[in-house]
Amino acid sequence: MQPQTAIEQLYNQCRESGHCHVLLDPQAGSPFSEQIAALDEKLAPRVHLRDPMFAGSPQEAPMLLRLPLSELPLLELLAVHAQQEATDPTSSPRSVCAFFQSTAPDASVASRLGWALNLKVERQGVYFRYFDPRVFLHLSHLLPADTLGHLLQGISAWSYFLWDGSLAVQAIPESNSPSPIHLQLTAGQWQAFETIEHFNATQRLFAKHGLPFEPARTIELFAQVHAAKALGLSTPDDTAHYLACSHHAAAPLSQHPAWPDVLMLLKQEVPLAEALAQLCSASLPAA
């Protein structure tokens, strides 16, 4: 029996309800804007999230589109485009971010998704782009299940593409909370979220050099990235380069006798790649 394609997976998820919600980010480009604009809004309603970043231009805010299965060809185009964005290590925007299931009214779901864009870190407001697949991937292991369910109440399953082209389907825990919340984190908790940028830089570099970085090992790899970042590597590129060189050397470079000297050079703003090549004879082969 052949494995299901991504579009078959999406179709099977949507068969019972007869539609699929798609979350789009106009700021990352709108490759199918004309096709979407041509849809009958009664059959394919759409609503932009109330995003404070785009208070002056609400049409640029993330858009929720409820696409009926009668528009399966467009759903397939969106899925293929999302997959292409996910598998291209040089592509930073994600114009097609998620496909999800919900029986709640669209306005209610959009309101929840809008609220979730803002969180507090030690009482300071932070714009939380949680819907980007490269961030959403980590929510289930960085947030308690009840918090995730509260943030995304009304949504039963959230699907998005991973960097290997596979479709991830995240079940959302049920929540009976009567009102939306602004997520509040301590500075320590936010440090884990800051690791996401380092994780993504590492994934891109590993892909560039053909090194293994499997989605199935996400939690293990995240822990490795977090530990590398804690060594004193302040930038995502440095963390990525350290881990890639360590993989190529088949040993953590922090165990090298010259590692303290590497850290000293970093404090003098010497690039990590130069410091590792000079003191540890560690470098990456040409991509």
Image (cartoon, grey):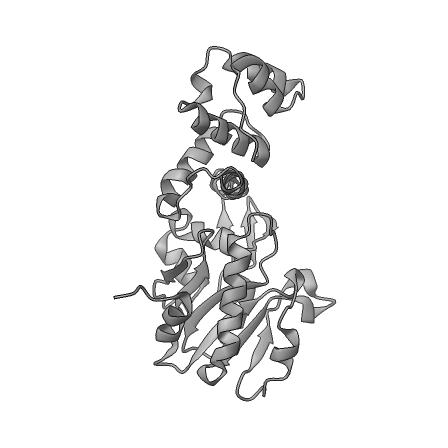
Depth check: 177 or 203 in front? 203
**Could you tell me which residue is drawn at 53 percent across and 16 percent down?**
281
What residue occupies the far right of the structure in this picture? 56
Task: Give the image quarter of residue 38.
Answer: bottom right
**Percent position of residue 146, x then y:** 36, 57
Q: Find the residue positioned furthest to the left.
A: 1
Q: Is residue 251 left or right of residue 29?
A: left
Percent x, y of residue 125: 61, 51
Q: Which quadrant of the figure contains the N terminus?
A: bottom left
Q: 126 or 98: which is nearer to us?
A: 98
Q: Quadrant of residue 29?
A: bottom right
Vertical relation: 238 (above or below) 212: above
The residue lying at 45 percent from left, 61 percent from top is 160
Q: Quadrant of the C terminus?
A: top right
Residue 109, visible in the rendered structure: no
* Horizontal side of residue 252 vs 200, given as left or right: left
| 41 is higher (above) or lower (below) than 222 | below
Using the image as rendered, state which of residue 236 and residue 247 is in the foreground: 247
Residue 243 versus residue 282: which sits nearer the camera? 282
Residue visible at 51% across and 11% down? 258
Q: Position of residue 84 (x, y in %)?
A: 53, 59
Percent x, y for residue 99?
Answer: 46, 68
Question: Quick check: 238 above or below 179?
Answer: above
The residue drawn where x is 47% and y is 55% is 136
Please tell me whether residue 163 is drawn above or below residue 47 in the rendered image: above
